[in-house]
Image (cartoon, grey):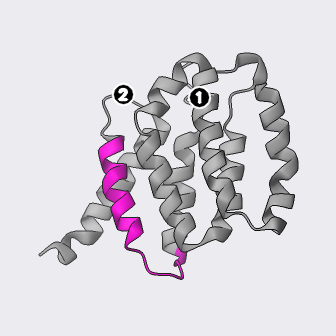
Amino acid sequence: NFPDNRPTVAKSMGSLLRQYTKLPSKSAAVAPVLQVLGQVIRGFRAPLTASHRAVLAELLLPLHRPNEWASFDRQAPVLSLYHKPLEYCILQFLEHQPSLAVKAMQAVLLNFPPPRSASTPKELLLLHELSVFIRYLTPEDFAMIYTPLMQRVLACL
């Protein structure tokens, strides 16, 4: 009976994603886990609970973090392995609670490569993600994120 196994499956998925953020590996099955997680998130009921929001904050947003073991010019291939399903998962959260867009955008902005060691492919992935998330911002939220967003966009030029 699947409902009985839900906690075990959730714990296993969370464990894999937490471990991956600490020590990334190209062989980790992050994309398939995110694909399943995206469907789970899609089924969440609004309003989101604190434990649901914790999935976003503690499991998904840290996947944007730079990988210390790889130089910035090699991070885009790693991120590209799971970027689409990661973006889908975050979009499912934004569909349920658009107010989380600011938090998602701030996390992406914080994890851009520094301008002097930029990674154009990674920057393109992250800029695309920001362009998708921006649709969920209210005018007030946009005003709050405008300055750091424009600073990052200008640094990419």
Residue 44 part of the magenta segment: yes
Quadrant for the C terminus, please. top right
Q: Which residue is mark 1?
A: 122
Residue 40: say if magenta.
Answer: yes
Magenta stretch: helix, strand or loop mostly: helix
Q: Quadrant of the N terminus?
A: bottom left
Image-based side of 149 in relation to 30, left or right:
right
What residue is at 33 percent from the left and 52 percent from the top? 35
Q: Quadrant of residue 11?
A: bottom left
For residue 126, which quarter of the picture? top right
Residue name at image x 79 percent, y 45 percent: 149
Position of residue 122 measured from the top left corner of the image (x, y, whole percent): 59, 28
Q: Is residue 51 left or right of residue 103?
A: left
Q: Which residue does the numbered mark 2 point to in the structure image?
A: 26
Look at the picture and state if 7 lies above or below 151: below
Q: Amino acid at mark 1?
A: Lys
Compute the Cα span from label 1 to label 2.
16 Å
Classed neighbour count for the residue bearing mark 1: other residues with Cα under 10 Å, few (<14), some (14–19), many (≥20): many
**Crowding near the residue tagged with mark 2, few <14, some 14–19, many ≥20 C-alpha atoms within 10 Å:** few
Answer whether residue 69 is visible to the viewer in this image.
no
Establish if 28 lies above or below 133: above
* Element class at badge 2: loop
Instruction: State the image coordinates of residue 50 (x, y, percent, origin top left).
Output: 55, 75
Identify the magenta region: 31-50
* Count of marks overlaid on the render: 2
Residue 85 in the image, given as x and y percentages of width and height: 41, 47
Q: Is residue 38 left or right of residue 5?
A: right
Q: Position of residue 74 (x, y in %)?
A: 53, 18
Along the line of sight, which residue is nearer the eye, 71 or 123? Answer: 123
Amino acid carrying mark 2 in the image: Lys
| 61 in relation to 76, above or below | below
